[in-house]
Amino acid sequence: MNANDIRKGIVIMFEGDLCKVMEFRHHTPGNLRAMVQAKLRNLRTGNQFEHRFRSNIAVDGPRAWEEQTWVGRKIRIGEIEFEAVEAKARCLATHANPITGHRDVPIMKTLLKAFPTERPTFAIAMRTSGRGGTINVGDTVAVSD
């Protein structure tokens, strides 16, 4: 599902349950990130909850942390070309369990130990360098200079 398809009243499959979108908003707080914040109602249990759908792309294949070397390079996923513009500095929110909200893993200390940098980084920020489009699971990923 494309984030642009999320609308009030539609029903989506979320973590194995059908959920109705009660409210939503597309949010671009800057810093090359975008997300959809939605209030969902589980149709099986009736419980309402909020979830933030982030614009993340996970890639299988590269070595751990390899994406940190991609900054300043071009990345093609399927037919869309991106520019890797910066390493993403992380904050204490990464310590929080996404389900419970409790801080249960010291991610920043782990990142700084694995990657001795001034700021703990994980992932990279990208922007399209041309027309946008749709990427799909299984699309080929290629990195070039």
Image (spheres, grey):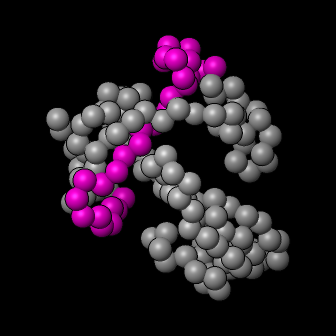
Say which residue appears at 70% left-offset and 30% top-offset.
105
Q: Is residue 96 magenta?
A: no
Q: Which residues are magenta?
A: 109-137
Q: Nearer the viewer, residue 30 or 11?
A: 30
Q: Left of 129 or right of it: where is 29?
A: right
Q: Left of 48 or right of it: where is 81?
A: left
Say which residue appears at 60% left-offset and 76% top-offset.
12
Say which residue appears at 63% left-offset and 34% top-offset.
91
Q: Quadrant of residue 11?
A: bottom right
Q: Nearer the viewer, residue 1 or 32?
A: 32
In the image, residue 112 above or below residue 81:
above
Residue 14 image offset from top left, x and y in percent:
63, 67
Residue 86 image offset from top left, x and y in percent:
39, 35
Q: Left of 87 or right of it: where is 15?
A: right
Q: Is residue 28 visible?
A: yes
State the residue lying farthest toward the bottom: 9
Q: Quadrant of residue 47?
A: bottom right
Q: Nearer the viewer, residue 52 or 104?
A: 52
Q: Left of 144 or right of it: where is 64?
A: right
Q: Is residue 129 magenta?
A: yes
